[in-house]
Amino acid sequence: MPNPRDPAMLLAAARLYYLAGKSQAQVADELGTSRSNVSRMLSEALSQGIVEIRINDPAGRVHELEDELQRAFGLRDVRVASASLGPAARIEEQIGTQAARLLLDNLKDSVRVALSWGHALQSMVYATTSDQEFHRLSLVQLVGGLSSVRNEISGQELVRELAVRLGAEYRFLHAPATLETRASRDALTREPSIAEALVEAGRADIAFVGIGTPSHGSSSAILDSLSLSESDRRAFWDAGPVGDVAARYFTADGTPVRGAVDDRILGLPLEDLVAIPQVVGVAYGRAKTPGVLGALRGHIIDSLVCDETLARSILSEVRGGSATGSTDRKNS
């Protein structure tokens, strides 16, 4: 009778049962053993890692990673898009689908939704469709217009497009996101229409924000648009920024980066963004790991939508250190 712990026999039993599709009785006949012994061999193959069972959610989510992220950071909601659904070129689309589902799960009458900007949120907006009608659903911007980024991913365009898709009311923040001086920024924020738009943004029930990397992409373009002096630029980088949400930069532990950059941004201050009942970060790609970790550790976001690669990278960092401050800030 075959040794039920012999790796070669375990592999043979597993291949016949799982790959050839034979019944346990047929496997027993081929290996010259009993059906009960085949059952034990299959269990042993699983325990030794010869057989691995993976369940793919048809909704495209990786629940074990979601659960681990939720436990590590005390998050309200996590959606991790599976990497098994298609090539890397579809990741942005998958992220948009998961973020759109989270958005729709949280929509009801009289809800105010705030948006920042970026490719991830653009994917969310394009993936959003709903036959349900909402009463007095409204959309607002978290940050002014961004001439330094492509128009189709700007806050104004995303707010308008999402409003059309949901039949919602919307309000633009008619102002540039970046100014040359703090005085110019302060003067504009005193304008009644701009001040009222910022107040409305601060009263949002839920906010969706992209998470940027200050050395790359649109986040880097914002810095370039400020025409910082050498001393201001050096002070900014010396502070150790790792990411930004709605053009508000922060360090690895989520501490806001104050100074010339923050002083010239026209948008909702970071402390007011954090006060919104639910802030959802949407990001994808391993390169976003430092920024997402900073947002999580600083309790800047309450929920996360990301891809499987980014989720595994974040958790790898956590296992190598600590999540720090895993309590949900809204309920602490």
Image: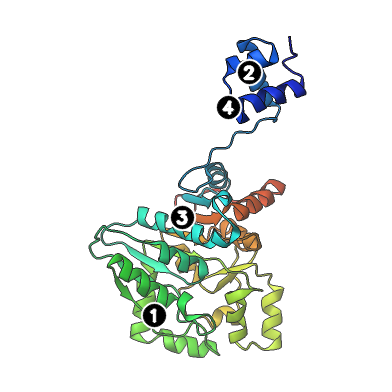
State which quarter of the image contains the N terminus: top right
Query: What amino acid is labelled 3 in the image?
Result: Gln
Residue picked out by circle 2: 27
Residue picked out by circle 3: 98
* Category of crowding for the residue at label 1, using alpha-carbon neighbours closer than 10 angstroms: few (below 14), some (14–19), many (at least 20): many
Whole-Å distance between the Cαs marked 1 and 4?
A: 61 Å
Whole-Å distance between the Cαs marked 2 and 1?
A: 69 Å
Residue picked out by circle 1: 173
Residue drawn at the location 71% of the way across and 24% of the way down: 12
Query: What amino acid is labelled 1 in the image?
Result: Leu
Above/below status of 68 relative to 317: above
Query: What amino acid is labelled 4 in the image?
Result: Gly
The earlier-in-sequence mark between 4 and 2 is 4
Residue 313, position as x, y percentages in the image: 66, 53
Give 94 or 277, whichever is nearer the viewer. Answer: 94
The earlier-in-sequence mark between 4 and 3 is 4
* Discs 2/1, front: 2
* Category of crowding for the residue at label 3, using alpha-carbon neighbours closer than 10 angstroms: few (below 14), some (14–19), many (at least 20): many
Residue 282, position as x, y percentages in the image: 51, 61
Q: Mark 1 falls on what kind of element?
A: loop
In terms of image quadrants, where is residue 251?
bottom right
Residue 287, position as x, y percentages in the image: 65, 63
Whole-Å distance between the Cαs marked 4 and 2?
A: 10 Å
* Discs 4/3, front: 4
Query: What amino acid is labelled 2 in the image?
Result: Val
Give 248 or 44, whichever is nearer the viewer. Answer: 44
Residue 92, position as x, y percentages in the image: 53, 62
Q: Would residue 253 be visible to someone looking at this image?
A: no
Please give the label number shown on residue 21: 4
The earlier-in-sequence mark between 3 and 2 is 2
The earlier-in-sequence mark between 2 and 1 is 2
